[in-house]
Image: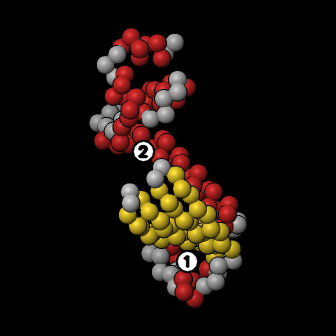
């Protein structure tokens, strides 16, 4: 669907950032393009820009390289796009991943009536209770306190 001739387009802005956290060295290059003739616009309406993010570095002592593209209905600076993309992944990693992997929400068979929404609310309450009480890794917390009903009750008070 994304037929792009990036080589023929010049970016209107670019931003490079580097991180050295959790044993990873990451360089991110964000480029913003407003010349939409480089892509086939038939599939998307309202596009104002597209963004190319190149990530490279060392993860688990191995080099990696990744290039991803985003389309957008706004035109902002490369630095702002970079921040918004990272914010999105922060939410994904802190919330959706936990729900999908730890709570197995995607594979839940609870589907009838209001049950699915009620259980989603309960999961949110549990996550918030853990965070309020200083637990930032739900996986580790689950292993530590899952069998301690008295402590679990204390978390709710």
**Marks 2/1: CA–CA distance:** 32 Å
Q: Secondary structure at mark 1?
A: helix
* Residue at figure coordinates x 50%, y 67% from the top left: 55
Residue at the disc numbered 1:
41
* Residue at figure coordinates x 44%, y 35% from the top left: 137
Above or below: residue 22 compared with residue 68: above
Q: Is residue 133 left or right of residue 97?
A: right
CB contact under 8 Å: marks 2 and 1: no
Residue at the disc numbered 2:
97
Q: Is residue 65 left or right of residue 79?
A: left
Corner quadrant of residue 110: top left
Above or below: residue 93 compared with residue 112: below
> 10 Å neighbourhood of mark 1: few (<14), some, or many (≥20)?
some
Residue 47 position, x and y percent, is: 62, 70
Q: Secondary structure at mark 2?
A: helix
Residue 45 position, x and y percent, is: 59, 70
Residue 35 position, x and y percent, is: 64, 81
Q: Nearer the viewer, residue 140 or 21?
A: 21
Residue 54 visible to the viewer: yes
* Residue at figure coordinates x 46%, y 12% from the top left: 154
Q: Is residue 100 left or right of residue 79?
A: left
What color scheme is it? secondary structure
Q: Which mark is residue 10?
A: none
Corner quadrant of residue 41: bottom right
Q: Nearer the viewer, residue 13 or 74?
A: 13
Q: Earlier in the sequence, mark 2 or mark 1?
A: 1
Residue 70 visible to the viewer: no
* Residue at figure coordinates x 69%, y 74% from the top left: 13
């Amino acid at each position: 669907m994304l037929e792009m001739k990036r080589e023929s387009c010049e970016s209107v802005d670019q931003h490079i950032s580097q991180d050295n956290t959790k044993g990873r060295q990451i360089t991110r290059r964000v480029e913003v393009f407003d010349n939409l003739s480089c892509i086939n616009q038939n599939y998307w309406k309202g596009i104002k820009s597209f963004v190319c993010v190149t990530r490279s570095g060392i993860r688990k002592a191995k080099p990696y390289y990744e290039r991803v593209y985003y389309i957008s209905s706004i035109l902002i600076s490369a630095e702002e796009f970079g921040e918004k993309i990272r914010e999105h992944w922060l939410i994904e990693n802190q919330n959706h991943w936990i729900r999908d992997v730890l709570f197995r929400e995607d594979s839940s068979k609870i589907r009838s009536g209001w049950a699915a929404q009620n259980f989603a609310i309960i999961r949110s309450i549990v996550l918030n209770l853990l965070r309020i009480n200083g637990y930032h890794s739900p996986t580790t917390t689950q292993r530590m306190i899952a069998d301690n009903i008295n402590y679990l009750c204390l978390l709710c008070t």
